[in-house]
Image (spheres, rainbow, N blue to C red):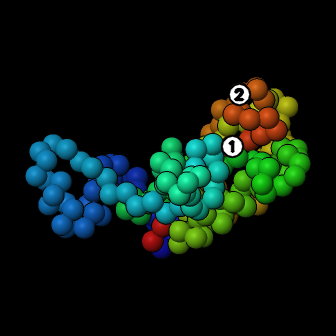
């Protein structure tokens, strides 16, 4: 479906209208709970706490006992929408050095593309992007330079939150990005 048509159709429906996309059985069950709407959620990609995008969630701990599930999911599908959790710009298990903001945003966007395509979507279907940027006054211009070209027109809406490098969760990370995308 053409992205512009999707955006127009979404703007005509309230968010709760997505319930119409839920199969009839689930819709019937939800109607039994008067006044309560529960979205259908399907985990597309698991993630361990700390943002690890490893697709396995609960590897057995020492002694063979299963560990509890992760704190968050990497990607959830609800109806025709995908919700991707924060993807950091640097993971030591993927790249030895953290790199600068341009290296990190490219890395995060490449991971985003991989996850979206694995879920049956694409960068062309991204509707909204949010980033947390370390020291934005220093990094946003270089980030924007590297960000260009990842999304076809019309580009998704985007917002960001700025913070100091000491607030990014672990040393070396300069950016974290998440998104909401459409999937057929």
Q: Nearer the viewer, mark 1 or mark 2?
A: 2
Marks 1 and 2, the one that precedes in the sequence: 2
- Give the number of the disc on residue 167: 2
Task: Report the quarter where the C terminus lies.
Answer: bottom left
Residue occupying image coordinates x 74% and y 35%: 170
Q: Give neighbour class at mark 1: few <14, some 14-19, many 20+ (Cα, 10 Å).
A: many
Along the horizontal axis of the image, is 138 left or right of 4?
A: right
Q: Secondary structure at mark 2?
A: helix
Check the image and report above or below for 154 versus 24.
above
Q: Which mark is residue 108?
A: none
- Residue 27 seen from this side: yes
Q: Which residue is mark 1?
A: 176
Report if residue 84 is visible in the image. Answer: no
- For disc 2, the neighbor class at 10 Å (few under 14, some 14 to 19, many from 20) is few
Are dots 1 and 2 in contact, CB under 8 Å? no
Asked where in the image residue 24 lies, by quadrant, the reply is bottom left
Q: Residue at x 71, y 33 (%)?
A: 168
Q: Residue at x 66, y 64 (%)?
A: 113
Say whether residue 74 is left or right of residue 133. left
Q: Determine which quarter of the picture holds residue 25.
A: bottom left
Which residue is at the front of the view, 163 or 169?
Answer: 169
On the image, the x and y values in percent for residue 66 come to 49, 54
Q: Is residue 120 above or below residue 6?
A: below
Question: Residue 26 at what x, y percent from top left?
Answer: 21, 62
Closest to the observer, 62 or 111: 62
Q: Is residue 179 left or right of residue 25?
A: right
């Amino acid at each position: 479906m053409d992205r512009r048509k999707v955006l127009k159709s979404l703007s005509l429906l309230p968010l709760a209208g997505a319930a119409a996309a839920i199969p009839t059985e689930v819709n019937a069950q939800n109607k039994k709970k008067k006044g309560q709407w529960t979205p259908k959620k399907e985990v597309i990609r698991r993630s361990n706490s700390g943002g690890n995008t490893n697709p396995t969630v609960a590897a057995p701990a020492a002694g063979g006992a299963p560990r509890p599930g992760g704190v968050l999911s990497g990607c959830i599908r609800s109806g025709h929408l995908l919700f991707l959790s924060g993807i950091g710009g640097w993971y030591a298990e993927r790249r030895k050095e953290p790199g600068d903001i341009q290296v990190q945003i490219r890395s995060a966007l490449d991971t985003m593309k991989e996850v979206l395509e694995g879920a049956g979507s694409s960068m062309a279907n991204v509707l909204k992007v949010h980033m947390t940027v370390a020291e934005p006054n220093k990094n946003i211009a270089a980030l924007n330079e590297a960000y260009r070209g990842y999304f076809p027109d019309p580009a998704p809406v985007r917002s960001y939150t700025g913070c100091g490098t000491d607030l990014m969760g672990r040393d070396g990370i300069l950016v974290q990005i998440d998104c909401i995308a459409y999937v057929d």
